[in-house]
Amino acid sequence: MTPLPGPHMRNDQPLLVLNCGSSSIKFALFQAGAGALPRRPWCNGKVQGIGGPDPDFGARGIAVRPVRLDPAHPYRDALRLILEHVQQQLHGRAPLLVAHRVVHGGSHHFTAVRIDAALLAELHGYIPLAPLHQPFALEAIQILLQHYPQVPQVACFDTGFHHDLPTVEQLLPLPYAWFERGLRRYGFHGLSYSYLAIAVAERHGQIARGRTIVAHLGSGASLCALHNLRSVATTMGFSALDGLMMGTRSGAIDPGALLYLMEVEKIGPAELGQLLYHQSGLIGVSGLSADPRVLLQHEHDPGQRGEQARLALALYVQRIIAEIGSLTARLGGLDLLVFSAGIGEHNAPIRERICAGLAFLGVKLDAQANARHAPLISRPDSTVRVGVEPTNEEWIAARDGWAVVTGQAVAQ
């Protein structure tokens, strides 16, 4: 894309990044200059609990506080709060650009691109493939078009990191004609994996270029197998519903069970989507919470509640172990396993249970290092190196947005 002329090329203007989900909006402000883009934003925060009874807002330098959102338009109201805070931080200036994490780009969009009316209309067609994220990112884009009409907006796609997966990893076992029509495995969490491919190479050196699996474990969860820091296999497929069991999502499930629910139980498509996206996973099995921290507190409770909490955690961990085993087979072995995202970075007991199930690979955990969430949590005699690495999706979006708008790459 031709760089924008004139004042838009100033390096002293900040970059705004928005990462929109169904119940939260994260924002970050980065400052680019002299071809460099610091990885740490100078201002960031989020509104969370959108649509629920107790939303709150917090930002750097501001303690988390409860907020009231318009019940008719809570998402729009949450974005208004963020934009007011951003305007205060910018002293009324407009940002150089706004970069958005957009979960799905379909079969045509894998690299970051400036948003125009035609692209926005096309992206609406992918809402059924990512209903927890896509509609909210697009709503934010439309609001920002009104708020900053002269500021370029850039879509950064979560599918992009996986766009050159081997063809066999893209295929679904359906008639090939459907693959040609775009029914294929895309893979997600691409902004996270793009950052982690950089970070693990910096931290672990040459070993990271071998057989690596990164576990992005948050409310949404997936695994990615890397070889030479490129995606060669991943657990999410056509939609962000596939693969691992998650907080409220089922992950991979026998399609015969879905046919049964529709044909025998007479569950319609909308109800089935609600079941699979919002009522399954940890919260579905436990009947208690989508948060492993809560389930860990209740797994020793007497009676049915404790039993369901234990089962939910056991199934969650078992599914991760099984998928790590599958990806290890595809890689032909495993040199490095890295945990990231909210659960992966901060939940030592879950990491411990996963690594215990991988003892057959020679994984040996350093309990003390794991307890303090150290960057390296495996013992020296572990066959597989195991690490913890914070992700940074917002920096990747800022980096890619800067490249699209200015035509300049930034130093890693």
Image: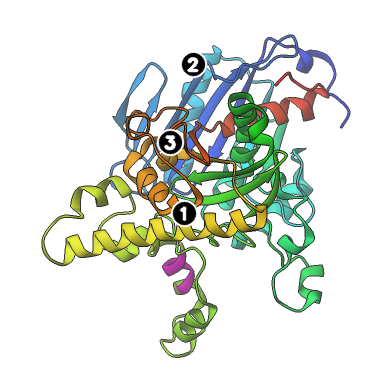
Query: Which disc, if any, is residue 360?
Result: 1
Query: Closer to the observer: label 2 or label 1?
Result: 1
Nearer to me, 167 or 371: 371
The magenta segment: 272-276
Q: Are marks 1 and 3 in contact (CB under 8 Å)?
A: no
The kind of residue tagged 1 is Phe
Q: Mark 1 to mark 3: distance in Å?
A: 23 Å
Residue at mark 2: 88
Closer to the N terminus: mark 2 or mark 1? Answer: 2
With respect to residue 401, does 35 lie above or below?
Answer: above
Is residue 141 something one can see in this rendering? no
Q: Residue furthest front?
A: 381
Q: Which quadrant: the C terminus?
A: top right
Check the image and tell me how it is coloured. rainbow
Secondary element type, mark 2: helix
The kind of residue tagged 3 is Glu
Q: Classify residue 78 as left or right of residue 136.
A: left
Closer to the N terminus: mark 3 or mark 2? Answer: 2
Question: Residue 24 falls in which quadrant of the image?
Answer: top left
Query: Which disc, if any, is residue 345?
Result: 3
The kind of residue tagged 2 is Gln
Q: Mark 2 to mark 1: distance in Å?
A: 54 Å
- Judge whether residue 281 is colored magenta: no
Callout 2: few (<14), some (14-19), or many (20+) C-alpha neighbours within 10 Å? few
Q: Residue furthest bottom?
A: 264
Q: Classify residue 179 as left or right of residue 287.
A: right
Q: Residue at x 71, y 77 (%)?
A: 174
Nearer to me, 148 or 89: 89
Closer to the N terminus: mark 1 or mark 3? Answer: 3
Q: Residue at x 70, y 33 (%)?
A: 153
Q: Main secondary structure of the magenta part?
A: helix
